[in-house]
């Protein structure tokens, strides 16, 4: 089991209804921390944000998270009998030939209109950009940069930014087709420009400002 270091593992019960009641901006990060035991990654946050944008209920999103390989691995140290009941129902109804109507058979818990008036795609792009900017700052704070490797470090930042843009665009296309979230192996696949081109520019703007200031401070 993930994180297991002895015969006994510290368990923290999940407050299922408390997660369902979180504000929009806190719902997905809170769900990842409770069900996966970690902060969300850019691909995961984009995938589930788009599921919510296109009408998935919070109950369905939590069931999908719990039913994932990572969710099941973490379930033993984050128990919730009510969530497990929802997952059992989810597994029974997902194979029914009813299209999206089959999810109406899941328990109706949480907000009746969880995504009404909230721009999930815009929020996800900014959340991912902030996370990447924070990671870049942390890397600079913990890594000694000599004058000889400055260009190499900045090139690595640019590569991470491009990977983020590709991953988000890939996730949007897969989610719009109704497929599962993409794997790490598909992150670097190239796609034509789509309606989410502004996502990469949001991230690029933050990176450009950050890197410009840092480079000036280092080279001055």
Image: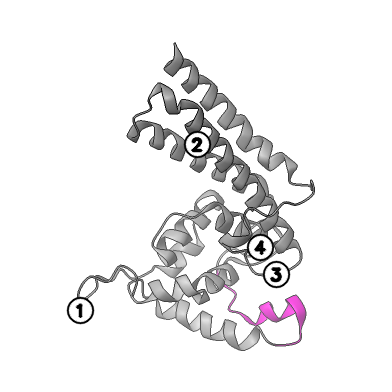
Residues at marks 3 and 1, CA–CA distance in whole angstroms: 38 Å
Instruction: Tell me which corner region of the image, top left, top right, bottom left or bottom right, holds residue 171.
Output: bottom right
Residue, x 32% and y 72% (percent of image)?
A: 77
Sequence-wise, which precedes: disc 4 or disc 2?
4
At label 3, counting other C-alpha atoms closer than 10 Å, the crowd grade (few under 14, some 14-19, many 20 or more) is few
Sequence-wise, which precedes: disc 2 or disc 1?
1
Look at mark 3 in the image and give the residue it sits on.
179
Q: Secondary structure at mark 2?
A: helix
Region in magenta: 96-109
Instruction: Tell me which corner region of the image, top left, top right, bottom left or bottom right, holds residue 10.
Output: bottom left
Compared with 128, 175 (above or below) is below
Residues at marks 3 and 4, CA–CA distance in whole angstroms: 11 Å
Residues at marks 4 and 1, CA–CA distance in whole angstroms: 38 Å
Look at mark 2 in the image and give the residue it sits on.
133
Instruction: Tell me which corner region of the image, top left, top right, bottom left or bottom right, holds residue 139.
Output: top left
Tell me whether circle 4 and circle 2 mark residues in contact (CB < 8 Å). Answer: no
- Residue 7's mark? 1
Q: Secondary structure at mark 4?
A: helix
At label 1, counting other C-alpha atoms closer than 10 Å, the crowd grade (few under 14, some 14-19, many 20 or more) is few
């Amino acid at each position: 089991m993930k994180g297991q270091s002895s015969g006994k593992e510290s368990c923290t019960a999940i407050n299922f209804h408390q997660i369902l009641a979180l504000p929009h901006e806190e719902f997905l990060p809170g769900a990842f921390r409770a069900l996966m035991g970690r902060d969300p990654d850019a691909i995961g946050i984009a995938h589930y944000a788009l599921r919510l944008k296109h009408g998935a209920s919070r109950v369905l999103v939590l069931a999908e998270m719990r039913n994932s390989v990572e969710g099941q691995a973490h379930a033993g140290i984050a128990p919730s009998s009510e969530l497990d009941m929802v997952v059992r129902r989810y597994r029974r109804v997902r194979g029914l030939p009813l299209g999206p109507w089959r999810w109406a058979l899941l328990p109706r818990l949480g907000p009746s209109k969880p995504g009404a008036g909230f721009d999930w795609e815009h929020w996800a792009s900014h959340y991912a950009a902030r996370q990447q900017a924070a990671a870049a700052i942390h890397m600079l704070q913990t890594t000694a940069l000599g004058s000889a490797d400055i260009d190499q470090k900045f090139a690595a930042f640019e590569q991470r930014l491009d990977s983020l843009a590709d991953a988000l665009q890939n996730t949007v296309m897969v989610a719009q087709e109704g497929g599962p979230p993409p794997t790490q192996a598909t992150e670097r696949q190239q796609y034509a420009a789509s309606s989410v081109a502004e996502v990469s520019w949001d991230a690029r703007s933050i990176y450009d400002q950050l890197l410009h200031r840092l480079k000036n401070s280092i080279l001055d």
